[in-house]
Image: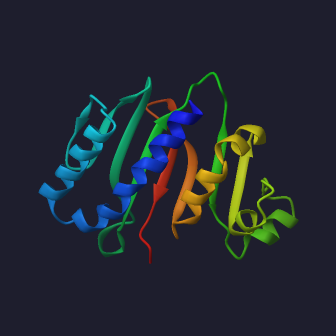
Amino acid sequence: MLTVLLTVMVCGLGFVGMSSAFRSWQAGRRRVLAEIAALFDLGGSHDDDGARGTLDGAALEFRYTARGRGKYAVPWTEIDVAWPAAYPLELYVRRQRWSDKREIDRGAMVDVTLGDRAFDQQFLIEAAPAEIARALLDAPMRRVLAAHVRVELTTERVADRPVVRLAIGPCR
């Protein structure tokens, strides 16, 4: 499962940069999503906003979305990979904010460290169990996360099923 997750997230990122360019052109977006579906042989479906299917038995979804509303809407690309319900995981990874140190020092947040000094300084990692987070956040995954200005790796519930979500925002 970890191999599927990492393969999908790392390989799928080649298309993330294209999401902004195609954001305004529905036909272009549909073409990119069809290419994503074909690349991973998802055998699922795609529309103007996403591509869905399975890979090695894991359900996947690539999706264009926006955070915020109106003139404040910001385009993001999200990749969801189904996570087995039998393996509990809570994960929240994002770039550090200036206020995080204070929250960590007073015990309001727990920052899991990986032993990669540069990554640990740049990213907040809240996870349980920490061992699974360390396995997910191996060197290739850390490089993927570090390559993006706005990026999050989280666990979410979609239709009452757990997923691991990689969300990538614009560079600015």
Please provide percent x and percent y for residue 113: 80, 55
Picture residue at 18% right of the left edge, 50% below the top: 30
**Quadrant containing the C terminus in the rendered view:** bottom left
Picture residue at 74% right of the left edge, 40% below the top: 128
Q: In front: 57, or 172? A: 57
Q: Residue furthest right?
A: 106
Picture residue at 53% right of the left edge, 66% below the top: 147
Q: Residue furthest left?
A: 27
Picture residue at 27% right of the left edge, 39% below the top: 37
Please provide percent x and percent y for residue 29: 21, 55
Q: Is residue 34 visible to us here?
A: yes
Residue 142 falls in which quadrant of the image? bottom right
Residue 4 position (above or below residue 25): above
Please provide percent x and percent y for residue 112: 78, 53
Please provide percent x and percent y for residue 169: 44, 65
Horizontal placement of 14 versus 162: left or right? left
**Total of numbered circles in the picture?**
0
Horizontal placement of 104 versus 29: left or right? right
**Quadrant containing the N terminus in the rendered view:** top right
Q: Is residue 163 visible to us here?
A: no
Horizontal placement of 52 versus 149: left or right? left
Horizontal placement of 162 versus 117: left or right? left
Q: How is the image coloured?
A: rainbow
